[in-house]
């Protein structure tokens, strides 16, 4: 069993933004209240393409608590943030965004505002950026709906045009105050499209999307890319085969409804199904959109490995990956009596004649030459490196192999 050298972890991410035009809100609220008293509530269709919980995830509701530093969503819970006036529909990733997910008009109305020229790949919160690209639609009943953070140049409607419920009006993006691709859908009056004991308004959905209460794993995978939050948001390639050139293996997960006390962890299993390394930690916070990852150095043992993701002691997902062999000897010529085994950073070498052992780094630079007589030898290699090893007699390469070396703590 080997000891992993490095495990890092963690978390992150929530999408946030805020509105700036309080005066306009007040003016509109006054007008719409008057109209509202004479008309039934407007029913909205979903403002985004896709299936909730599969393609699209509701990660923030409206904050009904007027106080600073206190939140209350439609279900008297915390799936919102202070001052949030809309509903956030998040995509899985920027890769999903690139596939082109449409924003839909939630009800029939007239387009009264379009902003369509701002950068749309923001990954950090800058509260000065507001809605970014957005479209506003005024409805006959006096409501105005806002569709914010759209992709640049994606507006499919023109100012003062009439749109129907369900009509495509733009593409989901990450413009304005946004760090993940999502639609911020906001209804001015202000109302929460969800009905619940903490929302005084009627339900506004034709079919209410489910209010998420249980933990949900949105996505997870294993990759040979080094861990970084921005990389994960874009989705790195799946690690199917792990080669000598790969230095780390990262397991990552994106999940909804994480609780402060949730224990999250990984268990890495060898080809013989032994636990090679495991790691666990408390989430330490609540989150509706939570990235988590853990990585190990590439193990030396070749074969089919498994990594299991655990929440509160239960396996919620597992992924397999194949580690390709790196220390088997590729015999050449008549060198049938040459055997090499790398253990940690020691090369055990059995040779049947006087020869040289040469080691190179992965860029091909010569690191060392050891001249050996026939017999069994132990040769020190650089620790924690990817090296190529050659056995040479005269100018003939008798054997060649590559290996990842590890310091084993002598
Ligand atoms: Zn929002």
Image: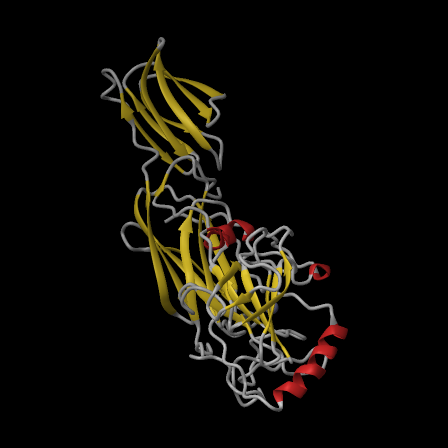
Who is closer to the viewer here, 149 or 285? 149
- The colour style of the image is secondary structure
Is 122 situated left or right of 66 in this image? left
Q: Is residue 275 left or right of residue 184?
A: left
Q: Where is residue 91 in the image (x, y as percent from the top left)?
A: 48, 61
Image quadrant of ligand 1?
bottom right
Q: Which of 243 and 24 is in front in this view?
A: 24
Q: Is residue 373 left or right of residue 383?
A: left
Q: Residue furthest toward the right?
A: 23
Relative height, residue 5 to residue 280 (above, below) = above
Task: Using the image, determine if residue 292 lies above or below residue 145.
Answer: above
Q: Which residue is drawn at 44% across and 73% down?
A: 215
Q: Indicate the position of residue 312 as horizontal and vertical percent values.
A: 43, 72
Residue 302: image location, x then y, percent: 31, 42
User: Residue 61 at x, y = what percent?
Assistant: 56, 75
**Is residue 7 in view?**
no
Front residue of this view, candidates 115 and 178: 115
- Whether residue 112 appears in this view of the structure is yes
């Amino acid at each position: 069993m080997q000891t992993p050298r490095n495990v890092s972890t963690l978390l992150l991410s929530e999408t946030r933004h805020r509105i700036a035009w309080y005066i306009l809100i007040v003016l509109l609220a006054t007008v719409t209240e008057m109209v509202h008293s004479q008309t039934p509530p407007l029913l909205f269709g979903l403002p985004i393409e896709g299936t909730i919980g599969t393609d699209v995830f509701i990660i923030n509701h409206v904050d009904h608590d007027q106080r600073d530093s206190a939140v209350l969503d439609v279900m008297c819970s915390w799936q919102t943030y202070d001052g949030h006036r809309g509903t956030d529909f998040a995509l899985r990733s920027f890769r999903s965004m690139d596939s082109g997910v449409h924003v839909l008009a939630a009800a029939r109305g007239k387009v009264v505002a379009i902003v369509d020229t701002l950068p749309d790949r923001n990954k950090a919160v800058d509260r000065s950026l507001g809605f970014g690209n957005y479209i506003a639609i005024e409805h006959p009943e006096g409501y105005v709906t806002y569709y914010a953070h759209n992709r640049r140049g994606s507006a499919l409607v023109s100012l003062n045009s009439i749109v129907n419920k369900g009509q495509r009006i733009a593409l989901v993006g990450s413009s304005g105050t946004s760090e993940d691709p999502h639609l911020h859908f906001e209804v001015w009056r202000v109302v929460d499209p969800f009905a619940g004991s903490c929302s005084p308004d009627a339900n506004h959905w034709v079919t209410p999307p489910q209010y998420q209460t249980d933990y949900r794993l949105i996505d997870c995978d294993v990759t040979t890319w080094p861990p970084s939050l921005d990389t994960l948001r874009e989705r790195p390639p799946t690690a199917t085969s792990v080669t000598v050139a790969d230095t780390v293996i990262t397991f990552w997960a994106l999940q909804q409804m994480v609780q402060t006390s949730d224990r999250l962890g990984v268990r890495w299993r060898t080809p013989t199904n032994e636990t090679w390394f495991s790691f666990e930690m408390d989430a330490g916070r609540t989150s509706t959109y939570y990235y988590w990852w853990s990585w190990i150095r590439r193990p030396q043992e070749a074969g089919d490995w498994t990594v299991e993701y655990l929440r509160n002691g239960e396996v919620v997902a597992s992924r397999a990956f194949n580690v390709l062999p790196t220390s088997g000897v590729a015999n050449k010529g008549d060198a049938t009596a040459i055997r090499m085994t790398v253990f940690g950073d020691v090369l055990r070498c059995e040779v049947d004649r006087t020869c040289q052992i040469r080691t190179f780094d992965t860029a091909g630079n010569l690191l060392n030459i050891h001249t050996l007589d026939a017999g069994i030898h132990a040769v020190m290699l650089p620790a924690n490196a990817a090296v190529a090893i050659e056995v040479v007699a005269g100018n003939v390469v008798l054997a060649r192999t590559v290996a990842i070396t590890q310091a084993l703590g002598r």
